[in-house]
Each structure stands twice: as C-alpha cells, then as structure tokens.
C-alpha cells in the first residue's frame, strides 16, 4: 500500500482513546515546553467547537520500531 493511500483525517480524541504507547524520538525531546505552553494548548483544545473542525497540522505516526 502506498503512503498516500494511508493518509486520512483523524479526530484528536481518537489518537488518545486507543490503547497505544507513543514514543517521541530523542531529537524531539530537546525542545521542552513550560507550563504556560501546555496551558495554551489545553485552552486551544477546549475552545474548539465540538460540532466543527479544526486543523492542527501534520502529525506523523509510524507503527513498529523505527
């Protein structure tokens, strides 16, 4: 299956309602958020209209060990 065939929109809640474990590569861990950054994100998530849609940008998920 080609990668383009696997690209599809998902609801943000679906990402966290699965029994999955997320691993963040070490090169991503160097960037750290302060409490205010988490608060801003949480407030943004809470302000989304549940009947509407919101574009978060690209999130890439890979299965297995890469």
Image: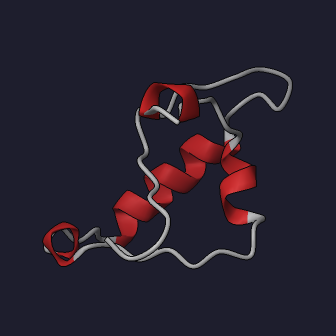
As drawn, the residue found furthest toward the top would be: 52
Q: Please provide percent x and percent y for residue 36.
A: 37, 63
On screen, residue 58 versus residue 22, left or right, reads left
Residue 35: give x, y in percent of width and height. Answer: 38, 71
Between 42 and 51, the one nearer to me in the picture: 51
As drawn, is 51 to the left or to the right of 54? right
Q: Quadrant of residue 47?
A: top right
Task: Please give the name of the residue rendered at 66% of the width and 46% of the height, measured from the top-left corner.
Answer: 12
Residue at the (74%, 76%) spot, across then down: 19
Q: How many marks?
A: 0
Q: Residue at x 28, y 68 (%)?
A: 33
> 24 above or below 44?
below
Please say if 26 is above or below 10: below
Residue 44 in percent (x, y) is at: 56, 42
Q: Within the image, what quadrant is residue 6 found in?
A: top right
Q: Give coordinates of residue 61: x percent, y percent.
A: 46, 54
Q: Quadrant of the C terminus?
A: bottom left
Q: Residue furthest front?
A: 1
Asked if residue 37 lies left or right of residue 10, the reply is left
On screen, 26 above or below 42? below
Q: Up-down: is 32 above or below 7?
A: below
Taking the spot 19% from the left edge, 78% from the top edge, the residue there is 26
Front one among 1 and 35? 1
Q: How is the image coloured?
A: secondary structure
Q: Nearer the viewer, residue 65 or 1?
A: 1
- In-front residue for pair 16/62: 62
């Amino acid at each position: 299956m080609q990668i383009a065939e696997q690209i599809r929109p998902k609801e943000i809640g679906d990402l966290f309602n699965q029994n999955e474990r997320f691993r963040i590569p070490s090169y991503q861990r160097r960037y750290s958020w302060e409490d205010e950054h988490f608060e801003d994100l949480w407030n943004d998530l809470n302000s989304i209209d549940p009947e509407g849609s919101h574009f978060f940008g690209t999130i890439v998920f890979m299965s297995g060990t890469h």
